[in-house]
Image (spheres, grey):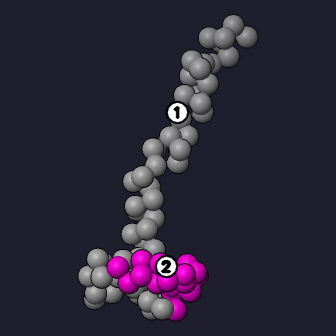
Amino acid sequence: MSKKPLSEIIHQAEKYLAQGAHRDDLERFLGKSDFAAWEKEAQRRWRLTRPLESIHGTRAGAQGQRGWRSPMARGL
């Protein structure tokens, strides 16, 4: 784990991205530990900006309109 504060790592990464560096090149610029911390935080922030349904799908969609019913309950 990096000894730098996360805010400093994020600031450096944003600076490199603003200068036009490709995301794949950030590992070389930041170093492995700082890049891993930045990538982990970027994933967390991405998940927080999305509604849960867009990530996991709706529960009702997986079970159908009325949920799971046994063959006996469906009259089969």
Provide the residue span drawn in magenta. Answer: 11-28
Q: State left or right for residue 33 relative to residue 68.
A: left
The residue furthest front is 19
* Residue at figure coordinates x 39%, y 54% from the top left: 48
Whole-percent x, y for residue 19 in the image: 49, 83
Q: Are marks 1 and 2 in contact (CB under 8 Å)?
A: no
Q: Main secondary structure of the magenta part?
A: helix
Which residue is more in the foreground, 67 or 57?
57
Quadrant hosting residue 41: bottom left
Quadrant hosting residue 36: bottom left
| Mark 2 lies on residue | 17
Q: Amino acid at mark 1?
A: Arg
Judge whether 18 appears above or below 30 on screen.
above
| Mark 1 lies on residue | 59
Identify the secondary structure beneath mark 1.
Answer: helix
Judge whether 51 appears above or below 7 on screen.
above
Which residue is more in the foreground, 71 or 41?
41
Q: Which quadrant of the rendered structure holds the N terminus?
A: bottom left
Q: Which quadrant of the rendered structure holds the C terminus?
A: top right
Q: Amino acid at mark 2?
A: Leu
